[in-house]
Amino acid sequence: MAKTLPDMAAVTPYTPENEKQRGTIRTTSVQSDCIGMILNFRGDFENQNLCYITSGGGAGTQINERIYMSILTGFSLYKSVKYDWTRDHDIFYAPYRNLTKKEIADCVLFALLHGSNQTATTTVETDEALFYLQNWFNPFDTEKFDWTHLSKIGKQAFEELTQYCEHIVKWKTLQTPYGNNKGNGIWLGLYQYRTSYDTVNKTYKKKFGKDYPNRDLYGIPYPESFKSAIEELRKRVEALAIDLCLTAGKEVTRTRDTFWESATTTATFV
């Protein structure tokens, strides 16, 4: 029976063609095309903004390749808003109009940069072998993510992301417990890079009785310029969310209220 270690919040993508190679990692609760999971607890809009993206398991909405763009866009809009008690009676709805390509690109990039994106590469152990599962949400994978439509603010954030990954983390040549990169690079995920070694080691040592083998892999801080770029991108996405998704000062009629799904909506502004 397979088990994941040491990052329980890591993405574990299940696909039929690699099921045999990866051993018995599928469960009855996870679809074969699952690439991640979005969990959301929206009982209190003000105080329980706990929406996050994580592994393919648990009680949440499964993400697959057909819906990942809309999931990331909705996640970005929801997580961009700075909450305060002036919005304590706000309701968060699906956008009342389709977003432009530029708006979607900015939203998707912000979703990948957000701290609640806890996707990561992880290791899987079976009775036959020990191997790694790659993080599906690699922002440098141009087949999945098209950044040609980014705004000026989005381009600056992506440039800072590139500088951080290539010159600080050096992810393309990083030697990890997940194997030899051979210059191609393994996208471990920002969640792993920013997680402190002490946090990882505590769990790993309790489970395996020894220290985690790569101290340099974790707790790599963002430069201030990267933090500033992410904040500017957040403000841009927040402005979209306030305009498109929040009810304050608006008279709104909608048929559905799930923020990541498409909905037939009408809106009147007063």
Image: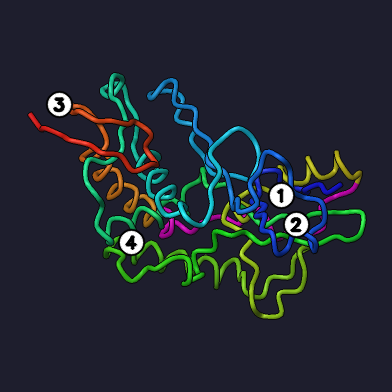
Residue visible at 38% across and 23% down? 46
Residue visible at 65% across and 55% down? 13
Bounds of the magenta span? 210-227
Residue 135: horizontal and vertical position, in percent?
Answer: 62, 59
Residue visible at 31% across and 20% down? 88
Secondary element at image label 4? helix
Task: Give whichever of discs 1 and 3 has the lower sequence position.
Answer: 1
Secondary element at image label 1? helix
Task: Give whichever of discs 3 and 4 has the lower sequence position.
Answer: 4
C-alpha separation, residue under disc 2 versus residue under disc 3: 53 Å
Question: Which label is found at residue 251?
Answer: 3
C-alpha separation, residue under disc 3 versus residue under disc 4: 31 Å
Front label number (2 vs 3): 3
User: Would residue 215 be counted in the magenta stretch?
Assistant: yes
Front label number (4 vs 1): 4
Residue 189: horizontal and vertical position, in percent?
Answer: 59, 57
Q: Please name the residue that numbered disc 1 is placed on.
A: 197
**What amino acid is found at the position of numbered circle 2 in the picture?**
Arg
